[in-house]
Amino acid sequence: MQCKGFTLVELVFTLAIAAILMLLAMPSFQRLAQQNLVNNASQRLFTQLNLARTTAISKGKNVILCATEEGKKCGKNWSLGSMVFIDEDSNDQYDADSDHLISLNQATSNSAPNSHSSNDTGVIIQWRSFRGNKPIRFIPMGITWHFNGTFTLCLKHKPQVAKSIFVAKSGRVEMSRDSNNDGRDEGRDGEPVTCN
């Protein structure tokens, strides 16, 4: 009776070909994984922007979206997290005693209601507007309180893997897209989105 199987030479040859194919495919998988990190973070921020606007309209109250580090007060670094809250006293700051927290997106903790971990992956979030780095206020009509600007999200060590979110004074939020299929999103000026 003759045994059927592979010889050692055939097995080594097959493994070598498989290793070469994996090495050739690895850069594509890395780029895909990097793009997914930025896409996920931008989708969470996009959702928070829309949630803030919708809540302002449905509740008839001022709603704030601001950067936060620990979810207890507004800050300046959007990469560390963001929160949405109903601003009962209209001071653009979160007061746990009087304001109602709606959504919290923190970099390192999932301890608050509706919280999501996002930016512990090295995603940098920049906000540029005419009013500087102040909290974004949506008034009961659903428009921003004279805010329009752009969020730019990218990886810390790969600034070309980037996405933008545009916020209009009307409250409309729009995400950048790759309109020319070159693998990079374009801004409103038609140029590729990058972090500075």
Image (tube, grey):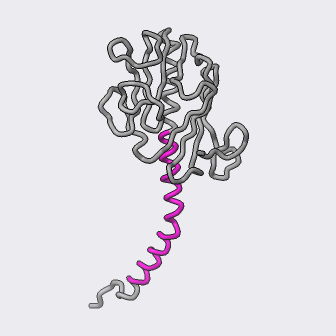
Quick one: quadrant of the C terminus? top right
Q: Nearer the viewer, residue 192 or 177?
A: 192
Depicted 189 relative to depicted 48: above or below: below
Q: In the picture provided, is 97 more to the left or to the right than 31?
A: left
Queried whether the magenta region covers residue 21, the answer comes back as yes
In the rendered image, residue 188, in percent from the top left (x then y), is placed at 70, 37
Residue 69: image location, x then y, percent: 39, 33
**Closer-to-camera residue (32/66):** 66
Q: State whether the magenta stretch is mostly helix, strand or loop.
A: helix
In this view, the residue farthest toward the right is 189
Spot the residue most to the bottom. 1
Q: Measuring 58% from the left and 28% from the top, which residue is drawn there?
A: 132
Q: In this orientation, which residue lies closer to the viewer: 127 or 76?
A: 76
Q: Please state if 96 lies on the left or on the right of 181 as rendered.
A: left
Does the stretch in magenta take in 114?
no
In-image side of 181 versus 50 (left or right): right
Find residue 19 and report its horizontal and vertical position in percent. Answer: 44, 74
| Residue ranking furthest to the left | 1
Q: Residue at x 57, y 15 (%)?
A: 142
At horizontal 42% and vertical 30% (from top left) the residue drawn is: 68
Please say if 131 is above or below 150.
above
Q: Which quarter of the image is occupied by the N terminus? A: bottom left
- Quadrant in the rendering for residue 8: bottom left
Residue 121 spot, x, y in % from top left: 42, 47
Range covered by the magenta-colored residues: 12-41
Q: Is residue 135 above or below residue 4?
A: above
